[in-house]
Image (spheres, rainbow, N blue to C red):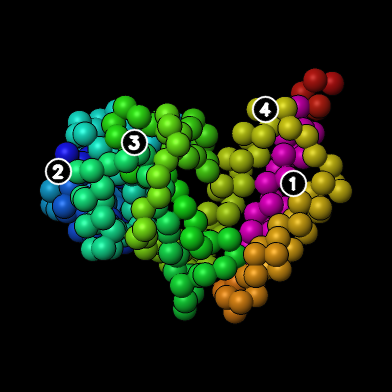
Amino acid sequence: MTLSVIIITRNESAHIAECIKSVQFADEIIVLDSGSTDNTREIAAELGARVEVSADWPGFGPQKNRALHMATQDWVLSIDADERVTPELAREIRSTMVDAQYDAYKIARLSWFGDRWIKHCGWWPDYVVRLFRRGQATFSEAAVHEKVVPVTRPGTLQNHFLHYPYASMEVLIDKVNRYSSAAARMMHEKGRRTSVGGIAGHAFWTFVRIYFIRRGFLDGKEGFILAATAAAGSFFRYSKLRYLQSARKSGQS
């Protein structure tokens, strides 16, 4: 059984080398770049990846489907540039493909933030479907928070990815802002509505769910920061949706 690895990138020079090095066991590594202004593409090419460039940015789900359509091997592993395949996970992937009981598999992610691995906040084990037979899964068309949609029920691997999502608070805050804008547009297009009370309620509940119910307080200051920024992301998302509602009303009047 052969394996294609697909990675979508934009300005990932800080991550892409270690990511690609962790998947060198694959038969094919495809990097689909969407306009990097750093040397992401050059680093990837030097490490043996097939590098393709898209002229536009359709959102995460559609972009990953583009990368998927470029894959040519029996199995596909989708990995983000800020993720790493451990040697243990690599061995499990190779053995699983030889004697697969399922056509798709979930893999846990262990994420690093601040000064620690995050074991609460809903971040662990954070299972995501990432390994699948080519032709047996696609990505949802969501602009953000996309996911693999397998044809049949997936199995679960025992080992996990390592995930390094935020190099600094600036990176975290920038991502919260960008993702909240995209999520608000998606909700608006689906006819979702909100109110001032809804904005406050969603933000409050997000903090309570992550910090208390999901025991984020056990992750120290990092848990508090993650709960607070998630609440801020919810506040921004629904506030932006409210403004989109107002803009539509103004346009109709």
Considering the numbered disc 4 on the image, is that residue within a helix, a strand or a loop?
A: loop
C-alpha span from label 2 to label 1:
46 Å
* Image point (59%, 52%), residue name: 177
**Around disc 3, counting alpha carbons within 10 Å, would you say few (fewer than 14), some (14 to 19), or many (20 or more)?**
many
- Foreground mark, 2 or 1? 2
Q: Quadrant of the N terminus?
A: top left
Amino acid type, label 1: Ser
Indicate whether residue 128 is drawn in magenta: no
Residue where numbered disc 2 is placed:
27
User: Quick one: 231 or 132, which is closer to the camera?
Assistant: 132
Q: Comparing marks 3 and 4, which lies closer to the viewer?
A: 3
Q: Earlier in the sequence, mark 3 or mark 2?
A: 2
Q: Is residue 237 one of those drawn in magenta?
A: yes
Numbered disc in front, either 2 or 4? 2
**Secondary-structure class at tag 2:** loop
> Which secondary structure, mark 3?
loop
| Residue under pointer 3 | 103
Question: Which residue, given by chain and number where applicable, does mark 1 sit on?
Answer: 239
Nearest the eye: 179 or 211: 211
